[in-house]
Image: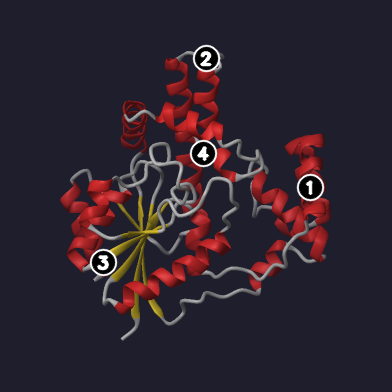
Amino acid sequence: MPKKIILLAGPTASGKSILAIKLARKLNGEIINADSMQVFKEFNILSSRPNSKQTKIIKHHLYGIISVKKHFSAGDWLKEVKKKINICLKKNKVPIIVGGTGLYFNTITKGISKIPNIDLKTRNYVRNLYKKIGSKNFYKQLLKLDPKIKGKILPSDSQRIQRAYEVKLKTKKSLFDWFNDTKSDFLDFEIKKIFIDIPREVLLKKISLRTEQMFKNNCIKEVRRFNKLKVKKILSANKLIGVKEINDFLNNSITLKDCKELINVKTRQYAKRQNTWSRGHMKNWSKLYSKNFSNLLKKSLKVVS
């Protein structure tokens, strides 16, 4: 009988963490994080990490495991998640991998390419070029360098277009040629895939409520502590929604009301990108939603049974 893994994805604030706990209780499972911001030790509130009450109910893995001062890639996550899956299976627990980072899920369902490490000189050259000529011109230049990326990466996806550029420049091989040469390490597993396909109007309300809760939990204090660490600007922890906005408020550039609204706007935009990703990369996932939570749980249990 194949070993079972459950993947649970969805846009930010869709209720993945709560559903994961309910599933874990029903299935004798443990939860593994698949959110690129929830891996950071220093961000508990802004990243909406499961609270201590939730982590006491069910064992949680890969939350708050890395310093914001360190780089943590999808490849690094894959190495860690393999270890945690094995630990769960040895204990006869069902691994339930939950989060909103599509790239992490891709490493499980499609594998990760063995792209050689890109040296710092090439990486800095590409980043400086992007800053110098802007995203529009950079994307045009990338299309000339690597025509295979056309229609596969959005011009607005700054991280991935820079990655595609540096890979082609250094290896002389398209990012997508590298991808085509990869396969999943979990081919002998039974993988059950659920995406919470929450209606937009419901999600917008949830996002606003969560932002208010973050401020009640003192996310401002969390950002102040983060600022003291003087984290390099190129590291991904700086991109966490709320860091820039709260700093703008602390610097008296914007009001608290504007700060909250900007966080809501950016979170909505992020949720939209997550939904767009799911349409392109998660076509064979079970898309589920119900206003009644117990109904959603029933639907989910039916998918994974």
Q: Work out whether mark 1 precedes mark 4 in sequence or the reverse, and give the earlier one.
A: 1
Q: CA distance from mark 3 to mark 2?
A: 44 Å
Q: CA distance from mark 1 to mark 3?
A: 43 Å
Q: Work out whether mark 2 precedes mark 4 in sequence or the reverse, and give the earlier one.
A: 4
Q: Give the amino acid type for the residue marked by disc 4 in the picture.
A: Leu
Q: Is residue 67 above or below residue 226?
A: below
- Residue at the spot 26% in from the left edge and 66% down from the top edge: 29
Residue 190 visible in the snapshot: yes
Circles 1, 4 touching at the beta carbon (< 8 Å): no
Q: Give the amino acid type for the residue marked by disc 1 in the picture.
A: Asn
Tell me where residue 291 appears, x and y as whole percent.
Answer: 22, 43
Q: Residues within 10 Å of mark 4 (few under 14, many from 20)?
A: some
Q: Which residue is mark 3?
A: 29
Circles 4, 3 touching at the beta carbon (< 8 Å): no
Query: Which quadrant holds the N terminus?
Result: bottom left
Q: Which residue is mark 2?
A: 254
SS label for mark 3: strand
Q: Work out whether mark 3 precedes mark 2 in sequence or the reverse, and give the earlier one.
A: 3
